[in-house]
Image (tube, helix red, strand yellow):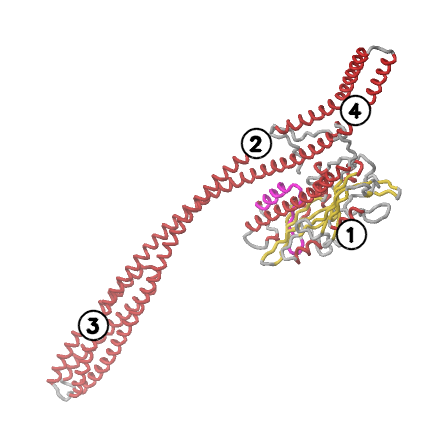
Amino acid sequence: MNARLKPDVEHIFEGIAQTRVDTLVEWTTEYWGHLDRLLEHLQSIQTSGSLSEGVVTSIWDKLFTATHNRASSLSEIFLLDREGTVRYSTYPAHLGRNYDQSSLLSSGLLYAREGQGRKCLFGPYGDPLTLSIGPSTSSFHDKMTLLFIVPIMENDQYSGALCGRVPNDVIGDLIQRESGHVYPDSGDNYIFMAKSKLNNHIQPGTALSRSRFEDRTFTHGDNLKDGVRTDWGVVSIKEHTELEIIFTDPATQQLHPGVARTIKNGNNLFVEFPGYSDYRHIPVIGKGVTFQLPNCPDVWGMMCEGDLEEVYRIRGLGWRMLRLYLPLLLISSLLLSVSVFGLMYQQVSQMIAALSVGALSAAFGLIIARVLHNKGTHRHIVHLEQINRFIRINAEGKGDLTQRLIPSEFDNDESQELAKWINNMIDSLEGIMVQVKQAAADVQANQQMLDQSTGSSVGSTERMSNRINDMIRSIRSQLKDIDLAKDVVDEMKVTLSQLENKASEQIGVAQDEVERIGDKMSQISSKVAETNETIITFMDTTKQIQSVLQVIDEISTRTNLLALNASIEAARVGEHGRGFAVVAGEIRKLADLTRKSTEEIHGTVDQIYINAQEAISSMEEGTRVVAEGTQLVAATTVILNEANAEDSLKTQVVDDVVILMEKIANVSKDNRRISSEVESKVKELLAEILNSRRTSTQVVAITDFLQQLVNQFQLTDSRKR
């Protein structure tokens, strides 16, 4: 009767299976994103040391709490160091626990460590701590656990892991939600192991999610919680479905045919009679698929099934109307035949017989129409009006998405199917609206934090801008001083060059005079025999020597004065004039030495003059004085030569100072350019932050408007998905 429904049934189970797989993949991807963003935030605020060492601050607490609130399915987020010790956790009692090579997490952590940054979705596995922490979003709760493991890599080396704990019943809720229960009495979606890579101890066909058999939700037959009674014994669970049972046929002890074919072929669709047996030994049909969740090394399988009888129990409107119409037509035909026979038996006139038959036909037609209306059309109209009213409430844009049609109030026909699919659509719509509402609230909360952070950034940037402006003004002032110092050095170079030229000329004169003294001393030595005339000539020569010594003394005095002025100018330059100050000091020492030497020569000449006067009485004494004078002339020559050499060294030092000041001037030009660029960039940054703040304000307004739209619908707030 319902063979025509087979294509629709195939499409239904294909859609249910694909929707469930997409839901699991999207959920897994979402939670990887939550943990990735948390890790990025932690790494961005980490200034020193290893992140996995557990440097806990109030900022850490806020970040972990915010992620925990957004990722509501997580019951705990914790951080492991390189040795597997818990350094931070949203569940404080977990702190300090170590997961070594023999722990529950060893294979998952090893998989992540050896993969050089490879993430791992580990589980399900039994962890008593999950039971102690408590449930997250599922009304069911036991120790079965899924663990998200994000390895922490520092310098390409594994240094720990960020982990998110999820009670495994959450995935049972994801695939068992109402929108998947098109067949409420039997519709069941459950996950099993198809091919294990990491959890090699789990055999193919082993249950990985809670089954509706455990929920006591079926209206037909037993369930696994109470025990499924079959001719081959009772099949039951002690604690939970996951890992405790393997989906086998109780009659053959072989894998459930749907599970076996799904593992073998990768998928399996079977919706025909006679179906295949389940735990209750009731014929079922459905779709089996295999899939792999993001970063899960194991391949899972999922069966989406329904009882064969429930799926095909529909009795269409055409059949219902035909079943109602045929008996009425038969009765009316019999009554009409009896009436005609009675009229003919009584031999009434043809006119009366015709009128009588017409009247009876009309009466029977009215009766049939009345019965068809009351039992058929009116009933369907009431159902359609009920569906129309339900759709109209939600179509107006302010509907109550918490309401559902009650399929049992409809006949087992197309109207009941329509009611179930409308419920399925409203359930999916409510799930989407709840997610939109949660996302809008999350965006609003984050936007408020962003707005506060932007406001703080504006203030900080303005303060930084003021500080930078002050610094730039200070730099520019220093640059002006450097430019002035360079000009002063240039002037000093010119002045020192002039002084050097003059000093060289004076020293040259002194050298000439000393040579003349030498000549005179030679003449005195050769003509020592000459007495009075030679002595008179020598006395005149000594007078000339005194005048020369006065010139040398004046040169020494002026050199000393110039050295003093050079020291003062070097002091004005500051740190950069320190080397030049040393040179000036050496020049002063040279001037002092020259002065002392001049004084000594002057005393010697005086002594020569006295000796010359005495030479008249003692020629031998004169000879000795001449010898001493010759030695002093030689010493004076050496001193003058050394003074000339010092002048050359002074010139070299001054040149070095000038070169250094030119380099400083070039650097000052670069600093002036860089300071201008920094000032411009700070202004641009301040403008961008202000623009970001305006954009943030606009996003807040848009988010508020989005929440207003969502709040027009009544939603089940307790529902997460």
Quadrant for residue 111, please give it. Answer: bottom right
Residue under label 4: 325
Q: Quadrant of the C terminus?
A: top right
Q: Residues within 10 Å of mark 2 (few under 14, many from 20)?
A: few
Residue under label 1: 203
Q: Are marks 1 and 4 in contact (CB under 8 Å)?
A: no
Q: For numbered disc 2, what is the local secondary structure? A: helix
Mark 4 residue type: Tyr
Mark 1 residue type: Gln
Q: Residue 370 in the image: state x and y as whole percent.
A: 76, 18
In the image, residue 224 above or below residue 654: above
Mark 3 residue type: Gln
Q: Which residues are magenta?
A: 59-84
Label 1, label 3: how many angstroms apart (C-alpha)?
Answer: 111 Å
Q: Residue at x 32, y 55 (%)?
A: 481
Residue 689 in view of the camera: yes
Residue under label 3: 506
